[in-house]
Amino acid sequence: PAGRALYQLTDDAHTLADDVAAWRTRSTRVRPWDGSYIVVQAEKLSRSEAKQQRARARALLMLGFQPLNEHLFIRPNNIEDTLQSVRYRLYKLGLEKDAPVFEARDFDTDLQRRITTLWNPRELEGNYAQLEKKMRTWLERSGSLEPEVAARESFLLGGTAIKHVVYDPFLPAEWVNVQARERFLSAVDEVDQAGMRIWSGLWASMEG
């Protein structure tokens, strides 16, 4: 039930449904980083193309890209099995089909240093710890809640946590504490499973 809340965050729920629904497998689509990057070149859009601008921004954000300059967006090359898979997901999520998506490496020292500042790993780790604690606390007390209260709280808490999963950049182990991320993801899965049990029981009691 919590996952359904995410569909309301988009302009085109049907386009994004498959990608959002796959949040449970996000961490399995991460691979070791070889030091290269994925780069997207995107031309400036006019005001009349605001809808396309929103679709592009959404696609780039969902796959963890950050702007390197006005026309180039970048992320570590550590997601999906191939560059083609990343390209396909970007196009499916709303990036223009003619936008080049390519691999790059061996940036000069100054640019490499600037690239690593585009994300905030410490903030991500803080969110992992904070949300994990919140979810663990809720799991411990969820059994004592009235069914309607537990259902509502699981929906809200689960929706917030899943949104963080969907928009997590999944940075490589060289940049972020992967163990903290995995603990967070485990807690999200437990809350999701608990929420499904609670909602199933609530519906069954209502039908009865």
Image (spheres, rainbow, N blue to C red):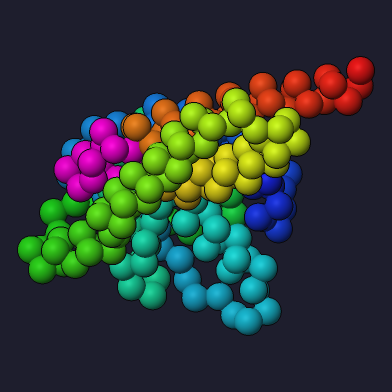
The answer to whether one can see residue 153 in this image is yes
Residue 188 in the image, given as x and y percentages of width and height: 48, 34
The magenta stretch spans which residues?
170-181
Q: Identify the residue at image location x=10%, y=63%.
A: 108
Q: Quadrant of residue 48?
A: bottom right
Quadrant showing the C terminus? top right
143 versus 33 height, above or below: above
Where is residue 53 shown, x and y percent of the image?
Answer: 58, 68
Residue 200: where, in percent of width, then height? 75, 22
Residue for point 52% across, 36% down = 138
Q: Quadrant of the N terminus?
A: top right
Q: Is residue 11 above or below residue 25?
A: below
Who is closer to the viewer here, 60 or 155?
Answer: 155
Does 178 appear in magenta?
yes
Q: Taking the image as drawn, is residue 102 in sight?
A: no
Tell whether 135 sits left or right of 122.
Answer: right
Going 34% across and 44% down the picture, which residue do you hit? 129
Q: Is residue 182 magenta?
A: no
Q: Is residue 84 left or right of residue 198?
A: left
User: For residue 3, which quarter of the picture?
Assistant: top right
Q: Is residue 81 above or below residue 115?
A: above
User: Measured from the top left, where is residue 145 in percent x and y?
Assistant: 65, 33
Q: Farthest residue to the bottom: give it.
A: 47
